[in-house]
Structures are given as structure tokens and as C-alpha cells.
Image: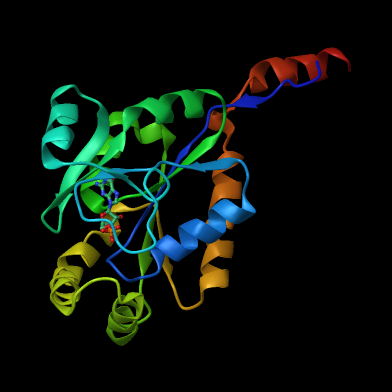
Amino acid sequence: MTTPITKRGLMLVLSSPSGAGKTSICKKLLQQDTDLVLSVSATTRKRRPGEVEGKDYQFLSIQEFESRINKSQFLEYAKVFGNYYGTPAQLVEGTLKSGVDVLFDIDWQGTQQLKARARQDLVSVFILPPSIKELEKRLFKRAQDTSEVVANRMSKSASEMSHYPEYDYVIINHDLDKSVQQVQSILCAERTRRERQIGLVEFVKYLRAQL
Ligand code: 5GP
């Protein structure tokens, strides 16, 4: 019995109000953890400078996005800030089956849809900013959106933040490295959950048979 324990991958969801630092946490996490794959979302929003097609998002026209909705090609989708965002279903199921975990940077609407579809596979983390001043600073520092877009995002923050009780874990992002460490600890514990380790019954039987 060489590799008795296999596992099904889990879905790690990170959500936050815009500007709380979630994207930076995701990037660092992916650099440090090779057993984690990012679910690249599709969106109808305009590409920001520096964003790469297929890496940051699949940038689609509204017609193309709606056609994919009609063909049930999204695991979840939602309208956020007036644009469509959605998770292409194709990659996710195969990745989970192969035992690799999938990271989602999606909002609370998408998280609710994933929860309804596959609660047992879902681990959800909500990221809060340390203060509103910091949230605004980060949004402006990004400097890729117009001040109108930033103001719109700030005004939506309160309602987005109200969804934190729907999440399994909450992290206040005072410090990027510390927050990444906290997410890694969550991942480590969730990967060790008994229900996620397939083949435990056989393995323990095998151990006991030798006594
Ligand atoms: P941004 O435009 O700043 O990249 O993203 C805006 C918001 O949309 C963020 O809160 C982000 O998490 C969310 N988002 C990105 N991709 C998806 C997705 O596939 N589904 C859902 N529901 N939300 C998404």
C-alpha cells in the first residue's frame, strides 16, 4: 500500500470589499503553494493596464458572456459593479477530481452559488480591511480606475462587508504576509479534514491487519 490516501481537491474562496488586498493575497498564495490552481474568471469589464487575457481574466463581450450563460458554461456568475463576472465550469471539476485545490477570487453572490452547489468542497474566507482609510488608500494606489469608479466601489463597500457572517473564516488584512500565512494555515487544516481524505478506512484496516 504505497499511496493509500488520496484526496479530492477543495474550493478555497476569498472574498472582500474592493481594495481590501484580496488579489495580492491570492497572488502570493499561488506563488507559495504549488498544489493550488487559480480559477480564472470571465468578465465583461474593461481590461485594466497590465492585466493579461487568460491570466487575470477572460475578457468577453456581453453577447459572448450571455451566450455562455445560456449554454450553462458557468459554475456561478453575477453582476458586480454593472459588469458580468463568472467562473467557467470546465477547469474546476477536473482539477478537484485530480486532488488539486482551486482558488476563487469571487464576490459574495458567487460564493452563495458555490455553497448551494457543493457545500462539502467549499472553504470560504472573507478579507476585511484594517480601516476605511486604508481601503480608500489601496483603491487609489491601484490608480487603474477613474476616481468615479473608485467612488462607486467605496460606496458599495458597506453592503459588501455586510456579508462576512456567511463565510467560514474572517481575516483582517493588517499585513499582507501575515494574512497569507493565515490563509495557508486554514488550507493546511482543511486539507487534513477526515472527510477529505479518501481511502482512510482501507488504510486503517491495512494498519490494523499488521498488528
Ligand atoms: P475586479 O473588477 O476588481 O477585478 O473585481 C470586482 C469584484 O468581482 C471582486 O470582488 C471579485 O472578487 C469579483 N469577481 C471576480 N471574478 C468573479 C467571478 O467569477 N464571479 C463572481 N461572482 N465574482 C467575481
**Residue at the (14%, 59%) spot, across then down:** 81
**Residue at the (39%, 62%) spot, across then down:** 50
Q: How many marks?
A: 0
19 horizontally vs 91: left or right:
left
Q: Is residue 196 above or below residue 167?
A: above
The image quadrant that residue 128 belongs to is bottom left
The image quadrant that residue 59 belongs to is top left
Q: Nearer the viewer, residue 32 or 5?
A: 32
Give percent across and percent down for residue 205: 74, 15
Q: Is residue 117 above or below residue 24?
A: above
Give percent across and percent down for residue 76: 24, 36
31 horizontally vs 71: left or right:
right
Give percent across and percent down for residue 24: 46, 65
168 horizontally vs 148: left or right:
right
In which quadrant is the N terminus drawn? top right
Give percent across and percent down for residue 22: 40, 63
Q: Is residue 202 above or below residue 194?
A: above
**Residue at the (32%, 71%) spot, across then down:** 19
**Residue at the (18%, 21%) spot, across then down:** 71
Residue lying furthest top: 209
Q: Nearer the viewer, residue 119 or 8?
A: 8
Q: Nearer the viewer, residue 161 or 58?
A: 58
